[in-house]
Image (tube, rainbow, N blue to C red):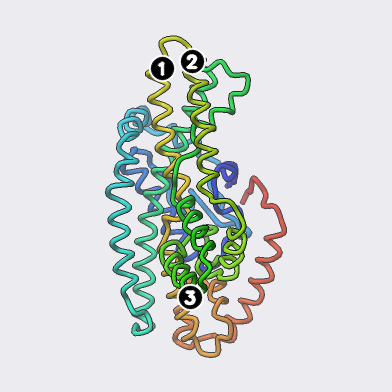
Amino acid sequence: MGWTRKFFDQWEWYHKPVSPMEETLLLPEHINQALSLISRRLGVKFPPQEKTWKVIDGYLYFTDKYWKLFLQIGIFLLPFRFFQQLPKAKYDWLNEVLPSYQKKIDDLRKINLDNYKGKELIELLKDTVKTEGKLMAESVYTVLYAIFSEISLKIAYWVLIKDKNPLNYHELLIGYPDRGIKSDIRLWEIAQIKNKIEQDKLLHEWLEEYGYRIQDKDISYPTLGENIETVKTLLNIYKDSPNPQERVKISQTRREARERYVKVNLLPFTEFIFTKIKGSAQEYAQIRNSRPYYYQGNQIIRKILLILAGRIPKFNEPKDIFFLHLDELEIALNGGEVKKLKEEIVKRKILYEKRLSEEPQLIKNE
């Protein structure tokens, strides 16, 4: 059977090896929920998990028979279903998905994890993973529309605008505020404060608000709030740097200049259709640019795992827990095979570092 990583250059994540805990705890929930959601809403039927995706030599692969998805009965209804959802997907994401998710996250943050017993923490862990998986599924679904909207703008710009460089379409998508920019501006403001006590207080508040930012979609990677040295480095950089708001203003000026260029060079009688395509792409681009700040559950999941690591008998390094499989974690919590698992962790860490230095094959056959 053939497997491919052909489309991974379009993704922000999974360019690195997948950790054992990610592979067995989050990845199945994320991918399977996403495919199930797409199937329900767009009518595309996916093969069973073992024929759809697989982790090979530490890297995520998808079936190379993806083209067969377009051979199924009823696929001719896909364009109708897709375009029907185009304006609705972003509205649902902003007004239903995110508020519902935020409520669950707020409730989880109120829990005193130290008061939970091992089995209770495992159940809470699995429930939180399901919550995060649901958000990931909705995110993947929404990003499908974001990608489609940008590709549509790219094609429309190339066809309808008299511009020697068709890649200039991208300037129409910049200069909008997003969560990342808001985070940077707030951190810059904190960096300007001279009073150390006041600065520390505000930095703590900033970490509460933005510290859950992920750097990659793997539970083994610490969130921004856990990288205190990185945050302090950013604080020192911002101390002597211009306000990030100025960068936004420059981008906004470039976008407005491109808007004027479009108005002058647009083919006659095409303004309405181009404006519709551009507006959709601009709205979805703002959603996509904020993605690292959506996934707050990773921070909670990591906290639960690290607490569980501290309860495993003779388990020296808490972060080693990310090199266990989920079923192995449950065994270790009961005191079974800890020595054997520790030996396996050493091997897995060495193998992981080796894979980091290697480029994964684009195609795999098994």
- Work out how far the residue at label 1 is from the one at label 2, CA to CA, in angstroms: 7 Å
Q: In this view, does 116 lie to the left or right of 240?
A: left
Q: What residue type is labelled 2?
A: Leu
Residue 334 visible in the current orientation: yes
Residue 2 visible in the current orientation: no
Q: Mark 3 points at which residue?
A: 197
Please give the name of the residue rendered at 48% of the width and 88% of the height, measured from the top-left corner: 335
Expressed as whole percent of the image width and height from the top left, the position of residue 357 reads 72, 59
Q: In this view, does 184 lie above or below 155?
A: below
Please give the name of the residue rendered at 48% of the width and 77% of the height, measured from the top-left corner: 306
Expressed as whole percent of the image width and height from the top left, the position of residue 217 reads 51, 58
- Work out how far the residue at label 2 is from the one at label 3, CA to CA, in angstroms: 56 Å
- Of tags 1 and 3, the one toward the viewer is 3
Q: Give SS at disc 3.
A: helix
Counting residues from the start of the chain, the first of labels 1 and 2 encountered is 2
Q: Mark 2 points at which residue?
A: 266
Q: Name the residue under label 1.
A: 271
Counting residues from the start of the chain, the first of labels 1 and 3 encountered is 3
Q: Which amino acid does label 3 sit on?
A: Ile
Q: Which amino acid does label 1 sit on?
A: Glu
